[in-house]
Structure formats: structure tokens, C-alpha cells
């Protein structure tokens, strides 16, 4: 059973619905990015082992993750001087307690000209960094940024796609069908009852980032599927909620208190990069990405540490092993 819903956020949602039905994307946008009540707006620790955290990411591995990311980015620059580039992390989590720095490279020695972090509230809630915030040579990096974008939910029923939204039964959010559907590139037909969670806003976010006047390297670590997989091989959709390290299909429980997410569509993101002048985008599992592009750093890190179960080796096991994060996450990267 869901916990008691925050009354202030329920009131905001009901006002936005105005007695009708919200698209799920609008419901999610309010729940995650409301200026004071949204999940990503509140200054709290969401990832890691701390009490009250909700999920793990690669950043939970500590500085090893930042070191291997920096090494891979230098390799992908293909001989260009990394000292020319500003490393910009979009969607950085808040600084941990007792620290004034945040981001994947916090406390990590690196060769880049400068570091800048743009937090989840800035990048996601305000759609995203404005014109002029990214210019010149940059490495634009994100870790689980695009899966946190609002998405639309569709179901194929009675020979047509129907969009599902959120209405209210008193103060309880409930799933409702919308009278009309948001335009989306949906397949012409599907099995009866097939659900498709369409990550349209992730493409809008990338379009706004890629349209800014910067050149260099784009690297996004996330979980996703191809369009064929989303439209043919995921009949229940890919949306889920995370709360206190438990995964749930109850997306309407605990508005503002749980994370909401779905798989990104890699094909859509790669097409967006191509439209904005990037070279061919490459998609690799996280394991392969680091093995291909940070092999020198890995060899040094492993051979210089003789202890079989050292903290560094435990972190690398978490990042690279297929049964941990190695094949759960993928990396999309491209140069412009």
C-alpha cells in the first residue's frame, strides 16, 4: 500500500488537472520537478548506501568511477589536447554531506581546462541549460540523465493507440484514459493491451543541449533500448518507480517521494545527435565502453594494487561485471 501522499503536492496536481486528466508526462514533471515539492528539487541524497537513499548508480562506486570516466573521455578525444576542454556534467547529484563539491570528477585529478556541474533541478526542471551556457570546446557528460525525463504512456486497445493519463478519485491518483493522444511516432499496430512508454522529453532535452554552440564530445550513460525493442519486445512497458532501493510498478504511489523512470530510446537520441552535426554515434555496454576506451587506466589500476579485494577492485567489479552494472547500462557517445 502506498504511503500517505504529500497533501501540498496532491493539491498542485489536482489544480493542474482542473477536474480532468493529466498526461502522465505532466504528472511526472510535477512530481519530479515542482520548484519546491518535486523529487529532484529537494536537497536530499537520492543515490548510494545512505539512509533514505532510493537507488544505486555508477557514481555509488566512488572516485574510481570519475577516474575511469576521465580516462575514457581523454581517449575519445583522439589526440586533441584535453586541456582545451571544459568538462560539463549535466544532471549532477547534490554534494554529499560534509562536502562542497559535487559531480563525477569531484576530488579526481583530471587534465581538463575546467569543470562545471549543472544539477538535476537546473537541467531537468528548467529545460535545460539556457543558450550560452554551453559554448566552445566541451565534454558534455551525463549519468542517468535522460531516463529521468517525463515520458508519455500509451496502450494499444481496440485497434488503436490510446494515451493513458492521471486523474483523481478524491485525493488518490488513478490511471485514466485521455480523450486524445499526444502525437508520437508509434508503430501502426501492436498486440492488444501492449503498453509503450514513450520517452519523448528525453529527445527534447538532447535537442536543446545539442543545439547550443559547443563542439567536442558527448557522453551519456543510461539504460535504454532500441526502438524495435521498445515497440515489439516490451509489452508491459519499461516504466518503474524506485523508493528505498525497492523497484515498483506502482507509478502513482508517493508522488514527489519516489523516483520515476523508463528506458530511453537509443535510436531517437542518436538521430538527434546526427541532426545537430555530430559524427556517427556509437552505443556500447558500459563494460565494453570502459574496456575499449580506458584500457590503459584499467591496467595501471589493477596491476598497481596487489590486494585481491581492495576498494578499487571492488568498485571496478561493480562497474564492469555483466551481472552488476556492466551490462545494465549503456553508453552513447559522439563527437562534433
Image (spheres, rainbow, N blue to C red):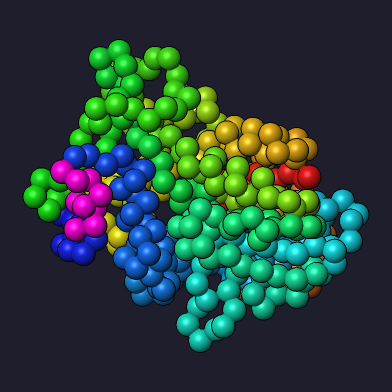
- At x 10%, y 45%, the residue is 169
Is 13 inside the magenta-drawn segment? yes
Image-based side of 14 in relation to 327, left or right: left
Residue 59 percent coordinates (x, y) = 56, 65
Residue 89 visible: yes
Question: Along the line of sight, which residue is nearer the eye, 180 or 224?
Answer: 180
Work out which residue is located at the far left of the displayed protein and give it.
Answer: 170
- At x 51%, y 62%, the residue is 122
Give the overall secondary structure of the magenta segment.
Answer: helix
Q: If the image is split into quadrants, where does the C terminus sit?
A: top right
Is 320 inside the magenta-drawn segment? no
Question: Along the line of sight, which residue is nearer the eye, 310 or 279?
Answer: 279
Work out which residue is located at the far bottom of the displayed protein and give it.
Answer: 98
How many marks do you count on the picture?
0
Above-or-below relation of 24 to 229 = below
Residue 243 visible: no
Q: If the image is split into quadrants, where does the N terminus sit?
A: bottom left
Residue 319 percent coordinates (x, y) = 60, 58
Magenta part of the chain = 11-19
Residue 194 percent coordinates (x, y) = 33, 24
Image-based side of 33 in relation to 177, left or right: right
Above-or-below relation of 176 to 44 = above
- At x 42%, y 27%, the residue is 183
Question: Along the line of sight, which residue is nearer the eye, 296 or 41?
Answer: 41
The image quadrant of residue 7 is bottom left
Above-or-below relation of 310 to 209 = below
Residue 101 percent coordinates (x, y) = 59, 79
The image quadrant of residue 3 is bottom left
- At x 68%, y 34%, the residue is 275
Amino acid at each position: 500500500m502506498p504511503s500517505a501522499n504529500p497533501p501540498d503536492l496532491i493539491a498542485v496536481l489536482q489544480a493542474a488537472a482542473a477536474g480532468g486528466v493529466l498526461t502522465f508526462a505532466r504528472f511526472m514533471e510535477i512530481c519530479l520537478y515542482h520548484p519546491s515539492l518535486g523529487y529532484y528539487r529537494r536537497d536530499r541524497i537520492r543515490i548510494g548506501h545512505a539512509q533514505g537513499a532510493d537507488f544505486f548508480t555508477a557514481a555509488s562506486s566512488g572516485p574510481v568511477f570519475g577516474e575511469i570516466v576521465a580516462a575514457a573521455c581523454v581517449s575519445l578525444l583522439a589526440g586533441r589536447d584535453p586541456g582545451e576542454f571544459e568538462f560539463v556534467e549535466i544532471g549532477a547529484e547534490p554534494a554529499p554531506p560534509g562536502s562542497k563539491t559535487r559531480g563525477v570528477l569531484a576530488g579526481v585529478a583530471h587534465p581538463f581546462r575546467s569543470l562545471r556541474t549543472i544539477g538535476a533541478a537546473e537541467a531537468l526542471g528548467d529545460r535545460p541549460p539556457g543558450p550560452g551556457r554551453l559554448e566552445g570546446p566541451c565534454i558534455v557528460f551525463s549519468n542517468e540523465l535522460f531516463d529521468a525525463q517525463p515520458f508519455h504512456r500509451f496502450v494499444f486497445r481496440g485497434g488503436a493507440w490510446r494515451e493513458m493519463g492521471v486523474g483523481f478519485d478524491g485525493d488518490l491518483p488513478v490511471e485514466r484514459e485521455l480523450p486524445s493522444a499526444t502525437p508520437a511516432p508509434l508503430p501502426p499496430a501492436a498486440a492488444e493491451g501492449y503498453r509503450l512508454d514513450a520517452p519523448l522529453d528525453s529527445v527534447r532535452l538532447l535537442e536543446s543541449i545539442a543545439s547550443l554552440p559547443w563542439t567536442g564530445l558527448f557522453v551519456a550513460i543510461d539504460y535504454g533500448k532500441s526502438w524495435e525493442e521498445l515497440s515489439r519486445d516490451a509489452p508491459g512497458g519499461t516504466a518503474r518507480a524506485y523508493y528505498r532501493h525497492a523497484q515498483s510498478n506502482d507509478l502513482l504511489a508517493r508522488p514527489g517521494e519516489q523516483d520515476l523512470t523508463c528506458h530511453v530510446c537509443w535510436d531517437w537520441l542518436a538521430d538527434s545527435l546526427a541532426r545537430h552535426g555530430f559524427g556517427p554515434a556509437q552505443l556500447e555496454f558500459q563494460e565494453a565502453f570502459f574496456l575499449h576506451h580506458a584500457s590503459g587506466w584499467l591496467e595501471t589500476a589493477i596491476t598497481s594494487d596487489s590486494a585481491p579485494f581492495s576498494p578499487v577492485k571492488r568498485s571496478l567489479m561493480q562497474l564492469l561485471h555483466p551481472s552488476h552494472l556492466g551490462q545494465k547500462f549503456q553508453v552513447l557517445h559522439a563527437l562534433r
